[in-house]
Image: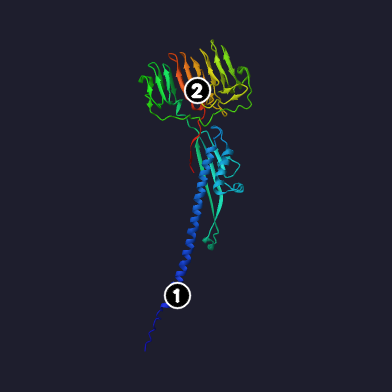
Amino acid sequence: MVLIPRSRTRSPRDERGAVLVLVAILAIVLFIVSALVVDLGMGRAERRTVQATADASALAGGNVLFAANPTTPDYNAARDAVKSYATQNLGLSNADWASCSDSTPLPISSGTPCISFEVTTSRARVRVVIPTRTVGTSFARVIGVNELAVSATARATIERDSASDCGLCVLGSGSTHDIQNGDVTVTGADIHFNGNVNASANGLVATNGEITVEGTATGPSSSYQPAPTTGANAIADPLEDYYERPDMSGLTAGSDPCTSGPGIYGDLTVNGGTCNLSPGLYVITGLWKMGGSGGTIAGTGVTLFFACGTTSSVTACAQGGEDGGTIDTGGNGVLSITAPTTGNYKGMALWFDRNNTEEAHLHGNGLGAFSGTIYGQSIELRMSGNGCSNTNALIIVKDLGFDGNPSCLTSTYVQGANVQLPPNNLHLDQ
């Protein structure tokens, strides 16, 4: 007899037990995965918040880095703006900032390890590392993960090498700027007129750039080279947020700038000969003019600021306009000055209080070896006589007028010889 073993038939109870074990294992795995998903999701949400704060803080720092002066960075103001914005959004403390570290900071320290700067002639950068924050976990604690570390880095860049689009910027809207028979030639930048412009048959408006006019351009087509673009957008004063008034502290009233140097002065008449100005700032509340015998006012590293008031009480010109100090080169007078090449007033030669409405007159050969910006938001610059004035200037005025046949203004815009335009194009690049 041969015995054949019989296999034991598995009962339904056995199968149910195996399924329960498998379900339990899968439930544990699912719980762990769900815990990780939930906590990692919370971590990612916090990371987005921290990154957004880092981005906005870097931009806030860049926005105030040159708020006080377009040429001199204020690192303390930028650092404080970064910390203030980040603290408001994340509740960071001074201790958080003090303990923060950045393995690759920019070259210029702010005194706070995680805020640093880089400033060159062409750009400025603000780097921000948000101090590491911890996010507590909920479900992931069961696998030993009690918290997640979150930090973020951002870098904002602002361009500093921007040139002025217009070398001659005439700001007065709602009026007609009458060139008459005068010649105005600008090299190195555009010519722009807010309002309208008129040139007579013997007049000339010329540039190697573009001529743009907010309103209309009247006169023979040959008087414009190239043909003007009319109906253009009005432009704002490119220096409006800066150069309101200079720092006059330390300046004293004087009577003879030719011998006393920088200071506060009223009227001056140069009748023949040369008045040599020492480098520095001259605040003028009166009329500086050349007499019938002409004369020269000369100086290197010189800024002339035309204000209102008196030598004993210099005041800002009244809102809405007030006649203040000005200059009139007279018959054959020559103004031969060069603006500073360093310092807060780098590139600024003739500077008028922005509400000073007095006319400035440059006659004949009134500008000789002149280099630097002529800035008068509310003045009319009048060119008279039969000579030609040559400048390396950025000219920003409310109105420009010509008398004589022909009176001539030739200007070459040299960016490095003029004021630096405010930094622009603030953006994130990291």
Q: Earlier in the sequence, mark 1 or mark 2?
A: 1
The correct choice, above or below, for 326 with respect to 133 in the image is above
Image coordinates of residue 402 in percent, x first then y, are: 45, 17
Q: Outermost residue toward the bottom? A: 1
The amino acid type, in three-letter code, at marker 2 is Ile
Q: Residues within 10 Å of mark 1 (few under 14, many from 20)?
A: few
The correct choice, above or below, for 303 with respect to 61 in the image is above
Q: Quadrant of the N terminus?
A: bottom left
> Disc 2 on helix, strand or loop?
strand
Q: Are marks 1 and 2 in contact (CB under 8 Å)?
A: no
Q: Which residue is found at the position 50% from the left and 44% from the top?
A: 55
Q: Return the residue at label 2.
A: 379
Q: Outermost residue toward the left? A: 221
| 96 on left or right of 161 | right
Q: Nearer the viewer, residue 218 or 259?
A: 218
Q: Residue 17 carries which label?
A: 1
Residue 197 shows in the view: yes
Q: Residue 288 carries which label?
A: none
Q: How far apart are marks 1 and 2 (CA)?
A: 97 Å
> Disc 1 on helix, strand or loop?
helix
Q: Which colour scheme is used?
A: rainbow
Indicate the quadrant where residue 119 lies: top right
Image coordinates of residue 175 in percent, x first then y, are: 43, 23
Image coordinates of residue 113 in percent, x first then y, are: 59, 44
The amino acid type, in three-letter code, at marker 1 is Gly
Q: Which of 116 and 285 is in front in this view?
A: 285
Residue 302 shows in the view: no
Q: Which residue is found at the position 43% from the left and 75% from the top?
A: 16
